[in-house]
Amino acid sequence: MTRTAAGRAAAKRAATGALTGLALGDALGFPTEFQDVPSILAGHGPWRERELPRPAVVSDDTQMTLALGRGLRTAMDRGPLGPRRLERPVREEFTAWYRSPENNRAPGHTCLRACHLLESPDRPWQDASQIHSKGCGANMRVAPLGLAPGLGDEQRSGAAQLQSALTHGHPTALAASDLTAHAVHLLAEGAEPTALIALLRSHALENRTRYHERWLGDLWTRSQDPGPGHFIARGWDECLAMLDRLGTAVRTVSPETDPCLAVGEGWIAEEALAAGLLCFLLFPDEPLTALRRAACTAGDSDSIACLAGAFAGAHLGADAWPDAWSGRIEYRGELLALGHLWDA
């Protein structure tokens, strides 16, 4: 990030905005997860009028975002970010979340299985990674890597893929996590929402056959691919196809239509990314409307809404969220502390 871009991000408090928006979307979508749209409308009223629940309880999406944020902060406090410096504290935070009594918010099976295996200190993390899983549990938590200051492109991409691979090792999970962090970073820097899809496509094409061996080690050998380039290209190709679908949806979808009908229900990584982006891009200057649309979807509504909130908050900053909402979100103190640290 350049000095000028860093100044813009700090001035609007992009990190605080993105982390707060992620948690608000999570809390709004958590009660409607696993429901279809008619059931949501019957139980919660018109989607444009939804208010934040009382209490504003979040799911494992925000919990794991904060776990990653804590691990990332610890790693960066110890020196320049690299794979060995990042892996240990994030692994410790993930396993602490796994054992926490607060881990009772419908966590994903992939995260639970991988974190159980990560508890064994002698097991290489690559042997814990769920190589065939591309669930959205990795990219719904990756926003901190788009917000932490001072990272270069290689560090951001490699670290985004590593944190995914600790649990979700499928190449599409890696690519979607990379793209999610890159989108948050671009918006925090001041990228225009209308240019975002093209910028993400360029990033995907530039990295299509680049395997981050420094960060991922021999992860690819757990797959059936003939080589590391072939392994990672599978993930980027699925994400590129989804970005094409997203581009069509932005031009053609009515805001009154469930976004999941256009880009999928969000249970898997590339669909969650596209659905969260679609809700944001339909309402780039109306952050609460974007969250309300994302929470009224037939798919993984809390993950879709937390991604939409991260994008909106990175774009508009902390002032996007009214005090009546942000002032009562669960984990508010920790969200603000991390946001203020990076905004400073």
Image: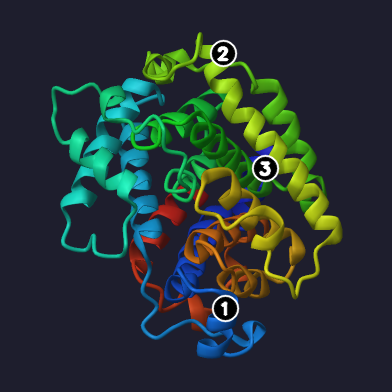
Nearer to the camera, 28 or 262: 262
Residue 344 appears in the figure = no
Nearer to the camera, 289 or 84: 289
Q: Are marks 2 and 1 in contact (CB under 8 Å)?
A: no
The Cα atoms of the two marked residues, 2 and 1, are separated by: 46 Å
Q: Earlier in the sequence, mark 2 or mark 1?
A: 2
Q: Position of residue 63 (x, y in %)?
A: 33, 57
Q: Secondary structure at mark 3?
A: helix
Q: Which mark lies nearer to you, 2 or 1?
A: 2
The Cα atoms of the two marked residues, 1 and 3, are separated by: 24 Å
Please name the residue shown 80% across and 63% down the image: 253
- The colouring scheme, among rainbow, by chain, secondary structure or one colour, is rainbow
Q: Which amino acid type corresponds to the residue marked 2 in the rendered image?
A: Gly
Please name the residue shown 34% across and 33% down the image: 130
The quarter holding residue 206 reads top right
The Cα atoms of the two marked residues, 3 and 2, are separated by: 26 Å
Disc 2: which residue = 229
Classify 10 Å Cα crowding around label 2: few (below 14), some (14-19), many (20 and above). some
Classify 10 Å Cα crowding around label 3: few (below 14), some (14-19), many (20 and above). many
| Left or right of 299, for residue 108 | left
| Left or right of 65, for residue 121 | left
Q: Position of residue 15 (x, y in %)?
A: 53, 53
Q: Position of residue 289 (x, y in %)?
A: 67, 75
Q: Secondary structure at mark 1?
A: loop
Disc 3: which residue = 186
Is 216 rendered above or below residue 257? above
Classify 10 Å Cα crowding around label 1: few (below 14), some (14-19), many (20 and above). few
Q: Which amino acid type corresponds to the residue marked 3 in the rendered image?
A: Leu
Q: Quadrant of the N terminus?
A: top right
Q: Which mark is residue 322?
A: 1
Q: Position of residue 298 (x, y in %)?
A: 57, 68
